[in-house]
Image (cartoon, helix red, strand yellow):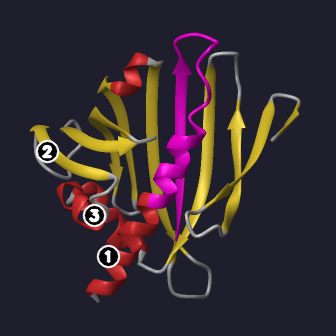
Amino acid sequence: MHCTENYLFLKARSCYNQEISWSKIMASSVLAGKLETDVEIKASPQQFHDMLSNKPHHVHHTCNDKIQGCDLHEGDWGTVGSIVCWSYVHDGKAKTAKELVEAIDAEKNSITFRVVEGDLMKEYKSFLITIQASPKSGVRGSVVHWTMEYEKLHEGISHPETLLQFAVDVSKDIDSYLTQAN
């Protein structure tokens, strides 16, 4: 990892030790940051987006070692304003997150979640996750772009690089599930 002006760059690797892409942490202040990465998958953008927006309660079937469940707390699956509760294991610890579905764009295969309660709120004042699946150019498959925008509660809290790797690993597991089902 090295620093250049207000940017920190790191190379993300999947659990298969394959290079994923350059990831970027943009520090707009000492506490606020933005972390991004791309994950290449074989599934279509629509399949991946449908799993996260309309069927997040099925994600635990794809990677039950990481995601234990996703329950609908309020609203309807696949609608803006709904609240979903995730149970997951991150860094070897059982955790929870209650997330508001802030935006869904079916045409762009994009969904945005705002974390409103749970373990992340112990370290972050705000945490926004946007996931967009786009078709690969000229070949079958997709590129899933993850963006995590956050504000830490204090300077002693690290950037969420391990959560980014968690997202990469979950993306690969969802992809395996979706492509084996076809």
Q: Residue at x 19, y 47 (%)?
A: 70
Return the mark for residue 177. 1
**Residue at the spot of label 2:** 71
Q: For residue 147, which quarter of the picture?
A: top right
Circle 3: residue type? Met
Can the viewer see residue 135 in this picture?
A: yes
Circle 1: residue type? Tyr
Q: Estimate how packed mark 3 is, as few (under 14), some (14 to 19) or many (20 or more) residues with alpha carbons within 10 Å.
A: some
Q: Is residue 159 above or below residue 89?
A: above
Give coordinates of residue 158: x percent, y percent. 61, 25
Left or right: 60, with 29 as reference point: left
Give coordinates of residue 95: x percent, y percent. 31, 34
Magenta highlight on residue 164 = yes
Using the numbered discs, state the Cα–Cα distance from disc 1 to disc 2 in whole angstroms: 20 Å
Give coordinates of residue 19: x percent, y percent. 69, 66
The residue segment tinted magenta is 143-169
Residue at the right extreme, as displayed:
4
The first of marks 1 and 2 along the sequence is 2
Q: Name the element at disc 2.
A: strand
Q: For residue 113, which quarter of the picture?
A: top left
Q: Nearer the viewer, residue 120 or 54?
A: 120
Q: Estimate how packed mark 1 is, as few (under 14), some (14 to 19) or many (20 or more) residues with alpha carbons within 10 Å.
A: some
**Residue at the spot of label 3:** 51
Q: Name the element at disc 3.
A: helix
Q: Residue at x 61, y 30 (%)?
A: 159
Q: Residue at x 58, y 70 (%)?
A: 16
Q: Is residue 143 above or below residue 32?
A: below
Give coordinates of residue 149: x percent, y percent. 54, 33
Q: Estimate how packed mark 2 is, as few (under 14), some (14 to 19) or many (20 or more) residues with alpha carbons within 10 Å.
A: some
